[in-house]
Amino acid sequence: MCYPRAMSAKEEIDKLTSELKVYQDKYYKEGVSLVSDSEYDRLSDRLAALEKEHPDLMHPDSPTLRVGSDLTNDFPEVRHTIPVLSLDKAYSDAAVLDFFSKSIEKEGGVLSFAAEEKIDGISMVLYYEDGLLVRAVTRGNGEIGNDVTANIMTIRSVPLRLSESVDIAVRGEVFIRKEDFERLNASEPDESKRAANPRNLAAGAVRRQKSSEARLVPMDIFCYEGFWQDKGRTPSDHIAILSELKRLGFQINPHLSFFAQSKADAEKRLEEAGLDGDGYAFSEIDSYIRKKTAERGTLPYEIDGLVFKINELDVRDRFGYTEHHPRWAIAYKFESPQAEAKLLGITVQVGRTGRITPVAEITPTKLGGSTIRRATLHNQEYINELELAIGDTVSISKRGDVIPAVEAVIDKNEDGNTTYRLPPLCPCCGTTIVQVGGLQYCPNYSCPDQVRGRISYFASSDQMDIATLGPKTVAVLYDAGLLRSIEDIYTADFSSACGLPGIGEKSIQALEEGIRESLGRPFALVLSSLGVAEIGKKGAQMLISGGFDTIDKLIEASKEGRTEAFTSIAGIGETIAESIIKAFRSPELLSTIEALRAAGLHLDASLDKEEESSEQIFSGQVWCITGSFRTFNPRSKALKEIEKRGGRTVSSVTGKTTHLLSGEGGGSKRAEAERLGVRIVDEDEFLSMIGQKAAEGKGDGQLLLF
């Protein structure tokens, strides 16, 4: 009897690689499953195991590269070999027509133009050698970008090997479809970690430290430009380039449009190129833009405009480039950005927990009725996602009507500046900055900025509410040596502060009275005011409800390292538990606690006076607040009234919001509430609901935004 010869490792790897490529192509390009999921996984696992044993036999375009690796990636800088520039902008159909007419006049002959959707994603350049993907590089500053090849290889629509051995650079846009974005965002329980939009999610995924994590984000790509190393192989026009890219295995956007002297000519040119799309005459540009604007909301992905390009490549060569953009293309933007500004510099701030936050210094810009000069940049990871450099032109928005934030880079700087990097040392105390997850921290507990921040937070109106002890006063008293810790609030002799900037006898009297009143604050408020990163007001209530109703119980459990005592409480995971334990083992915090105990603060919930119970009239309701109020100043007082009556408060209006308490200057939150049909309650109606009378007068008119 003859038995089949056992395959060698090379033969089995070759066979599995070939089979899995066929299965992948059929599934991801045609939606056809040739084998069951379990069978596919079995074959893929077997191939991965063989490749691990015989790495020298692994194919450079192995299907297992789609799975990613758990090895930590770095993102070295790589110089582009092709021009990667921004586009000139137009905000009206007249400006697009002007671009058409001036281009035709300059050339002195008949031209044609391609029109493509401007995908709101992440610009990427794919470099192939002999038909194999060797590098995937972000746009960067147009000359130098970051190598993110391992993460881009996980995108199914990126070919790892082309249908032909060719050296080519291909520009494309990485994006996430709306449906996938909504699904992923909904699956993130922590609202603060949800991405603001698909573009931000894609930007973060492209820079994940582990490609196995990038694989879990369903990124996609449309390719729109090709640059052959062998110039003799370059097609003669743009639609021929798109046709060739499609033949090589790239995914191009099917919503292509083409403009020529007549509609018939345009349609014929597309058909000859073998491309799907719509043909138009030049005279139809205004109706085309209206049509695409109307279709924008129905597309499965986000677009923020349209790109018009001269089709003929020889004309492009003659037109050339400015330092900033090609002269042969223009981007039509659906709408002007909320605000556009130039990044003049970046200031680094140190928070009360030591967290390092970069802040953008921008040209003075009108936004939402005020002039904005600064905007948040969150952290280094966010700066990397934007590939932000000093001198860039950026778009600014007000997130939740409150905090100005840099949202995107509109135009790159012309100075050659590369992506900004945070300094290695704390700008306040000079201590080496440490990385914790995606954030940077100054580890020096005695850093002056941290100390001032902790004292200001403890005394703030939302916490211990100590009258007149705001950040400016704290800074003056710190510099005078009177306040160097939270506990100094209860031991310092403030009479010696009289005469310091902004401090007189009356303010000292108010301060001393505020300190006396703070001694009666409930334990939950004292606990949340200590400034422990994971213990806000809700966190403090969760701990007390979970059995930690005295400070000593928290200290004891932390000293013994009883993580399970914290994780047994709903809403507290292992990471938060470990953070709490670390905080309550800190000698500095323990010293502060003992000093506050000696001062007479409530560190035991049983010492708190029982508050008069309120009828839970807002139970099951979700409230948001916007605008300014006569009665509730600060606005947090209104939040307390809602919460003690059983309501839940949120920072933005969504489909789950049931009520919006709207004061003067409600802004976009009110507009969104009206759009969603959320019940809008004014101040007088709210006071009536909670059984209070409206305050007389208009107050000081201070605009307090949540």
Image (spheres, grey):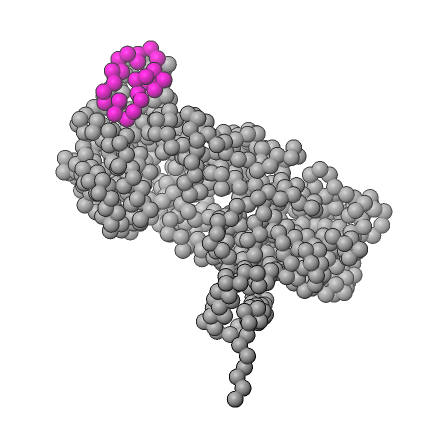
In the rendered view, does 607 fall on the left or right side of 151? left
Residue 331 appears in the figure = yes
Between residue 185 and residue 561, name the one nearer to us.
Answer: 561
Q: State the extent of the magenta-drawn residues as a range.
A: 477-500
* Front residue of 83 and 267: 83
Quarter location, residue 610? top left
Q: Position of residue 473 (x, y in %)?
A: 35, 20
Residue at 41% in and 40% down: 436
Identify the residue at horizontal 61%, vertical 34% (top origin).
417
The picture places residue 387, in percent across and down from the top left corner, at: 56, 41
Snapshot quadrant of residue 154: bottom right
Quadrant assignment for the C terminus: top left
Labels in figure, total? 0
Residue furthest bottom in the image: 1
Q: Residue at x 45, y 46 (%)?
A: 672
Residue 498: within the magenta?
yes
Is 144 on the left or on the right of 228, as rendered? left
Give the farthest residue toward the front: 1
Q: Residue furthest right?
A: 108
- What residue lies at 37% left-to-right and 40% top-to-bottom? 625
Query: In the rendered image, is residue 697 in sight?
Result: no
Vertical placement of residue 512 versus 308, above or below: above
The x, y position of residue 245, in whole percent, is: 69, 59
Residue 494 is situated, as x and y percent measured from the top left of the image, at 27, 16
The reply, left or right, for residue 554 in relation to residue 636 is: left
Magenta stretch: residue 640 in it? no
Residue 453 vertical position relative to residue 686 in the rendered view, above or below: above
Judge by depth and name the residue closer to the eye, 240 or 522. 240
User: Compared to 616, does 34 lie above or below?
Assistant: below
Image position of 289 (left or right of 399): right
On screen, 596 above or below 675? above
